Image (tube, rainbow, N blue to C red):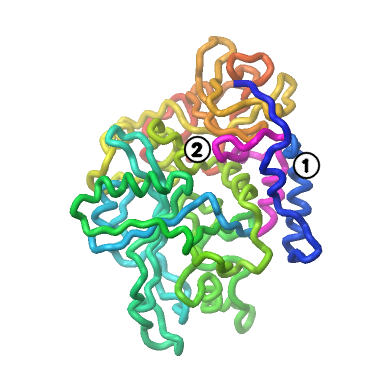
Amino acid sequence: MIMRHSRPIWASRLPSVTKDANPRLEQTSHWLLCSLRSIGFWDMAHIHSRSGNYSSHEETSSSGLTARLENQGPYATHLKSRAIIRFDGQDVIKFLQGLTTNDVSNFDKEKQVRLPLPTPNQPAQVHPPIYTALLSPQGRFLFDMFLYKPVYPVDKQDGRGSIPGSDGKGLPVLWADVDAASADDLVHHLKRYRLRSKVDIGNVSNDISVWQRFGGKESATSEVREGTGGIGWGGSRDLAGCTAAEGEADGWRWYTDPRLQDLGSRGVFPANVNPPLVEANEDLNEEFYLLWRLEQGVPEGPTEIRSGEAIPLEYNLAGLNAISFDKGCYMGQELVARTHHRGVIRKRIMPVNFVKDDGEEVQQAVAPGAEIHDKTSGKKVGIVTTVIGCRGLALLRLEASQREAHDLTVDASEIVHVKVVRPKWWPSEWGHKDEQRAISSA
């Protein structure tokens, strides 16, 4: 579908600079808004399917915005598009283990991430979050979610820094960070399979919120990040200060995003309170994070990963650490296992750029659902799933992804051509028409 739109609605919601604004946020907003204007974002189409910019080119991004973000930050944003579900009861792990694609039983094992030093607000070890998905019995994607195990007071030191704290009554077994638009559908879906399992499920989004830290200066590891903690004797880093700075008194803390380190840090925190490392007035608008995430070529949620239709491996969920091939049976496992062991992926979700014959970017011209055709053969080779302005994500046949931009067109149009961009994080085996067993190394 070729289309045209007026000034996007979301433009009016971008961060404004007021005389009372935090100076750092004022400077950030100024250059970000200038960058957006310079690439024509004020003329972009309305955000379709809650989507964002295309992924980073192997050498550089043509937008210029990513290059700036890679040298700035870290920034933080409250993800209002996400909701929190609470899981409680003695059968939670067993219940989710049979429904989700990842190995949730890791939460019952020894903690896997050792922090530099225990402090009164953080334990010596923590469970990293798990990114996972729920599938239909036919193996099609339905929902994705991030699972977090709370830090219980008994795992920490007390206020004197010596003995364990209280038992942490009132905390659930797990928190789940899910797409807000489909949260009620997810809760309904989960309750259908609960049967006699001792599991309580509830939406607690009014009490708990999801935050993301991102940008090039956000360190790739959750243990010690640049700029956290103090400097110790002789210029060494104060490791206890680093640990304490990443969390707060009740154990809430930041974790490296379980999908990709380049995405930054993610965490769940009490609502209406700024999380650690985020000062007042430093919360950037969520659209900036959407741009950052989609510059990395990462779809999220059942709108961008088409619920009831998407094949998980075609949407790169194995490469995003959402699938365990070593766990036992789960709902929809057969299709995933068969595709994995055959080792042949003929289509993948890939970032694309919409351009004219001369390479100039075409703004507000394509809608999700538009078909991509090979100009030479006239055959359909892909479909656009996500669009913002001149960029988007498309599910493409791998042989077509090797073609030049002038060989691929939108809806057989001679006006709009498609340039395919390879994400930096992809394994070297991915994205080639002779890809064989590449998924095994994802």
Q: Which residue is drawn at 58% across and 17% down?
A: 411
Q: Where is residue 328 in the image (x, y as percent from the top left)?
A: 23, 47
User: Would you identify the image quadrant in which residue 137 lies?
Assistant: top left
Q: Distance between the residues labelled 2 and 1?
A: 26 Å
Q: Residue furthest top?
A: 377
Relative to 154, residue 350 above or below: above
For the N terminus, which image quadrant?
top right
| Numbered label attached to residue 383 | none
Residue density around tag 1, few if under 14, some if 14–19, many if 20 or more, within 10 Å: few
Magenta span contains residue 79: no
Q: In the drawing, does residue 111 fall left or right of residue 25?
A: left
Q: Which amino acid does label 2 sit on?
A: Glu
Relative to 329, residue 104 above or below: below
User: Would you identify the image quadrant in which residue 334 lies?
Assistant: top left
Q: Residue at x 75, y 39 (%)?
A: 42
Per the image, label 1 sits on a secondary structure element best described as helix
Q: Where is residue 57 in the image (x, y as percent from the top left)?
A: 62, 38
Q: Mark 2 points at which residue?
A: 304
Q: Which residue is drawn at 50% across and 50% down?
A: 260
Q: Mark 1 points at which residue?
A: 37
Magenta span contains residue 50: yes
Can residue 231 be seen at all in this image of the molecule? Answer: yes
Considering only order in the chain, which callout, 1 or 2, is on the residue closer to the N terminus? Answer: 1
Residue density around tag 2, few if under 14, some if 14–19, many if 20 or more, within 10 Å: many
Q: Position of residue 304 (x, y in %)?
A: 50, 37
Q: Which residue lies furthest to the right in this view?
A: 19
User: Would you identify the image quadrant in which residue 6 lies?
Assistant: top right
For the C terminus, which image quadrant?
top left
Q: Which residue is drawn at 55% across and 78% down?
A: 241
- Report the span colored magenta: 44-73
Q: What residue type is labelled 1?
A: Arg
